[in-house]
Image (tube, rainbow, N blue to C red):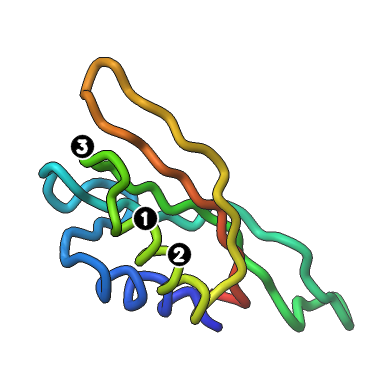
Amino acid sequence: MPLADIPVALLTVTDNVGHYIAFEQTDQYVVWAEETQADSLWADDEIQEQAIQGTIDYFTKTENDPNVQAIQNALNCVCSFRLNSVQYEDDTKFIHYEWAFEVDGL
């Protein structure tokens, strides 16, 4: 699936989805970003197939927030991913979920 499918999938969960920076910092919001090239297929000195890795961060003040599972369900349809970390941020009082994802190409 292409990179453009990531925000489309996230928007099925919430309309508060930002690319690189927060769209709006409310009690629940998502920020996603592509970060690096993963394994790629080269031939004749050109990339034939490229994989892109990135992260999706979900910030919530709700314990056991059902959007966490909804995000994972949405991602299942568009990319491979793994839950990278869950942290409580003392200074903002947010629970911060981070997923690493991988998709084909830009």
Which residue lies under the disc numbered 2? 72
Check if mark 1's residue and mark 2's residue have beta carbons within 8 Å: yes
Compute the Cα span from label 1 to label 2. Answer: 6 Å
Residue at 46% from the left image edge and 45% from the top image edge: 98
Extreme top residue here? Answer: 91
* Residue 12 location (% of width, % of height): 26, 76
- Of mark 1 and mark 3, the one earlier in the sequence is 3
Residue at 41% from the left image edge and 77% from the top image edge: 4
- Identify the amino acid type marked 2: Gln
Dividing the picture into quarters, in which one does residue 8 lie?
bottom left
Which residue lies under the disc numbered 1? 68
Which residue lies under the disc numbered 3? 61
- Identify the amino acid type marked 3: Lys
Residue at 36% from the left image edge and 55% from the top image edge: 68
Mark number for residue 38? none
Q: Quadrant of the N terminus?
A: bottom right
Residue at 32% from the left image edge and 51% from the top image edge: 31
Left or right relative to 22: residue 56: right
Extreme right residue here? Answer: 44
Vertical arrangement, residue 79 with respect to residue 21, above or below: below
Left or right relative to 38: residue 41: right
Q: Viewer-proximal residue, 67 or 1?
A: 67
Left or right relative to 103: residue 72: left
Element class at badge 1? helix
Vertical arrangement, residue 65 with respect to residue 14, above or below: above
Dividing the picture into quarters, in which one does residue 80 lie?
bottom right
* Residue 97 location (% of width, % of height): 41, 43
Q: Viewer-proximal residue, 94 or 40?
A: 94
Compute the Cα span from label 1 to label 3. Answer: 12 Å
Element class at badge 2? helix
